[in-house]
């Protein structure tokens, strides 16, 4: 399986989950490490784009392509499995509790979870504390210029 992560260039080579743990985001609380990736490049871009305007968008984004071996255990989550308010913005604490629980159980290395930003797509959340995490590899890091028409 391939996963994609759009990130600032200075963070591209590190897969740690520490960035998400600093503030806590939709699927993890402060202190819980989780690596947010997407099942396709377009979703990775959309997830970043919703947080910026053209004037505030940093120019140093890169697309990181990851190889996730097929034998790594993952859990696919469907919308009906999620808290009823999972799509709300700002994100509710119920989604953080949901993600924190799955991370602490440490059964699955990957959570394939519906995207809030792009209906029908999936985010791939990687648990860096799982024993199989070491098998995940960065395949490519490429400059990623945003098309300015997205921010009109």
Image (tube, grey):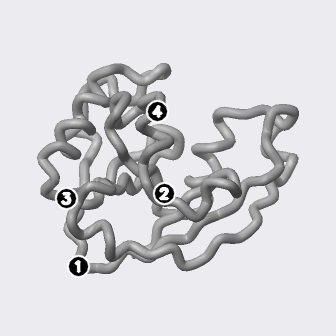
- Name the residue at 48% across, 22% down: 89
Left or right, residue 45 beside residue 97:
right
In the rendered view, tell whether residue 3 sits above or below residue 93. Answer: below
The quadrant in which residue 130 appears is bottom left
For marks 4 and 1, give the one nearer the viewer: 4
Q: CA distance from mark 2 to mark 3?
A: 17 Å
Q: Residues within 10 Å of mark 4 (few under 14, many from 20)?
A: few
Q: Residues within 10 Å of mark 3 (few under 14, many from 20)?
A: many
For marks 3 and 4, give the one nearer the viewer: 4
Q: Residues within 10 Å of mark 1 (few under 14, many from 20)?
A: few
Q: CA distance from mark 3 to mark 4?
A: 22 Å
Between 142 and 45, the one lying in front of the other is 142
Find residue 128 and report its horizontal and vertical position in percent. 33, 56
Nearer the N terminus, badge 2 or badge 3? 2
For marks 4 and 2, give the one nearer the viewer: 4
Q: CA distance from mark 4 to mark 1?
A: 30 Å
Q: CA distance from mark 1 to mark 3?
A: 11 Å
Q: Which residue is mark 1?
A: 71
Nearer the N terminus, badge 4 or badge 2? 4
Q: Which mark is residue 108?
A: 3
Q: CA distance from mark 2 to mark 1?
A: 19 Å
Nearer the N terminus, badge 4 or badge 1? 4
Disc 2 on helix, strand or loop? strand
Quadrant location of the N terminus? bottom left
Find residue 110 and report its horizontal and vertical position in percent. 29, 59
Disc 1 on helix, strand or loop? loop
Q: Which residue is mark 4?
A: 22
- Name the residue at 62% across, 47% down: 46
Q: CA distance from mark 4 to mark 2?
A: 20 Å
Q: Which residue is mark 2?
A: 38
Find residue 103 and report its horizontal and vertical position in percent. 22, 45
In the rendered view, tell whether residue 120 sits above or below residue 2. Answer: above
């Amino acid at each position: 399986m391939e996963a994609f992560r759009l990130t600032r260039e200075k963070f591209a080579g590190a897969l740690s989950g520490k960035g998400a743990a600093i503030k806590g985001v939709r699927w993890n609380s402060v202190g819980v490490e989780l690596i947010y990736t997407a099942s396709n490049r377009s979703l990775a871009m959309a997830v970043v784009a919703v947080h910026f305007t053209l004037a505030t968008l940093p120019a140093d984004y890169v697309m990181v392509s990851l190889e996730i071996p097929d034998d790594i255990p993952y859990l696919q989550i469907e919308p009906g499995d999620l808290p009823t308010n999972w799509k709300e913005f700002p994100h509710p604490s119920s989604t953080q509790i949901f993600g924190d629980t799955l991370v602490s159980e440490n059964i699955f290395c990957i959570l394939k979870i519906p995207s809030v930003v792009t209906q029908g797509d999936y985010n791939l959340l990687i648990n860096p504390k799982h024993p199989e995490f070491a098998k995940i590899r960065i395949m490519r890091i490429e400059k990623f210029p945003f098309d300015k028409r997205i921010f009109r």
